[in-house]
């Protein structure tokens, strides 16, 4: 019998498929990133057994611990979707297939320097603060081009696209202007040829994101259920 995670995963795949078709898009052009933060490794195994390969984590310590615990799962790919401090770049570069939250030239350089070329290039997305909220993560749009250039000049990195996290609200439609703005920034900075991926949309607003061109949707709660509210031990700083 399928696990509850397997059942929910299938329901989310169907949601993505339906939203893509409604938006006149190829369903295969939207990938699902299963956001497993705060959920135990056992739940990730269940998702893996149901065919999921891409997992998103927000915290470096949690990512490295889980990567070790799940090293036997062939083909599993880890993506960092939380704020990354430069001094932890080495740890992430050793295990991740992509970092979706690069927000400075300095971090791009450090990841490029720390990535072992033997592992293949590290995928990089730039997190953009499109809402302009001062407390939000991501680079201001005005800094985007210099960060893109810094990534392109690092042989160990592969520029993949842009990510944004809109302000939290109850109405998924509130996210639309932020998603539209990310798509506009992509068009402004070389389009899909330079920036193939748009990582936007979560459990509550993935349909809107897909209408606006998302190629990665990051889904946690709808697959794994409510997150236990505590933070993982030893990482007091960043919010989920
Ligand atoms: C936690 C998180 C998600 C998943 O959010 P859900 O609402 O649980 O689907 C997606 N993206 C980022 C950046 C997150 O931190």
Image (cartoon, rainbow, N blue to C red):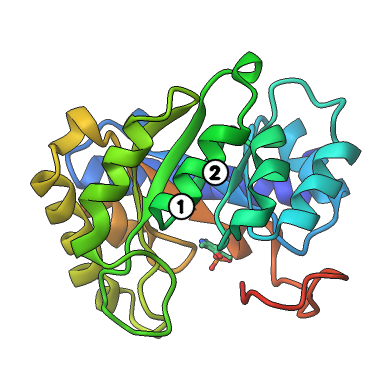
Quarter of the figure with residue 76: top right
Q: Which residue is mark 2?
A: 110
Residue 198's x, y, as percent? 31, 46
CB at disc 1 and ligand 1 closer than 8 Å: no
Instruction: Say what secondary structure mark 2 lies in.
Output: helix
- Is any atom of residue 15 visible in this view? no
State the quadrant of the N terminus. top right
Residue 185's x, y, as percent? 16, 54
User: Which quadrant contains ligand 1?
Assistant: bottom right
Q: Are marks 2 and 1 in contact (CB under 8 Å)?
A: yes
Residue 59's x, y, as percent? 70, 60
Q: Which residue is mark 1?
A: 106
Q: Is residue 28 left or right of residue 14?
A: left
Q: What's the CA distance linking mark 2 and mark 1?
A: 6 Å
For this orientation, the residue located farthest to the left is: 188
**Residue at (52, 49) in percent of width and height:** 12
* Numbered badge on residue 159: none
CB at disc 2 and ligand 1 closer than 8 Å: no
């Amino acid at each position: 019998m399928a696990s509850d995670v397997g059942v929910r995963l299938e329901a989310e795949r169907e949601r993505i498929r339906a939203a893509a078709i409604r938006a006149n898009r190829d369903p295969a052009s939207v990938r699902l990133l299963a956001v497993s933060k705060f959920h135990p490794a056992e739940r990730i195994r269940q998702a893996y057994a149901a065919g999921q390969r891409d997992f998103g984590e927000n915290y470096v310590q949690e990512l490295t611990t889980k990567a070790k615990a799940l090293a036997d799962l062939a083909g599993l790919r880890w993506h960092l979707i939380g704020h990354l401090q430069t001094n932890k770049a080495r740890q992430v570069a050793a295990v991740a297939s992509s970092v979706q939250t690069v927000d400075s030239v300095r971090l791009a350089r450090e990841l490029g320097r720390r990535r072992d070329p033997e592992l293949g290039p590290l995928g990089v997305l730039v997190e953009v603060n499109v809402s302009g909220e001062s407390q939000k993560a991501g680079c201001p749009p005005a800094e985007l081009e210099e960060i893109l250039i810094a990534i392109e000049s690092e042989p160990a990195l592969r520029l993949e696209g842009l990510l944004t996290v809109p302000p939290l609200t109850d109405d998924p439609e509130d996210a639309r202007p932020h998603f539209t703005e990310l798509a506009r920034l992509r068009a402004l900075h070389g389009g899909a040829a330079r920036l193939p991926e748009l990582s936007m949309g979560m459990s509550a607003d993935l349909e809107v994101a897909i209408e606006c061109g998302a190629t990665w949707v990051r889904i946690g709660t709808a697959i794994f259920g409510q997150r236990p509210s505590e933070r993982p031990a030893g990482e007091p700083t960043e919010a989920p």
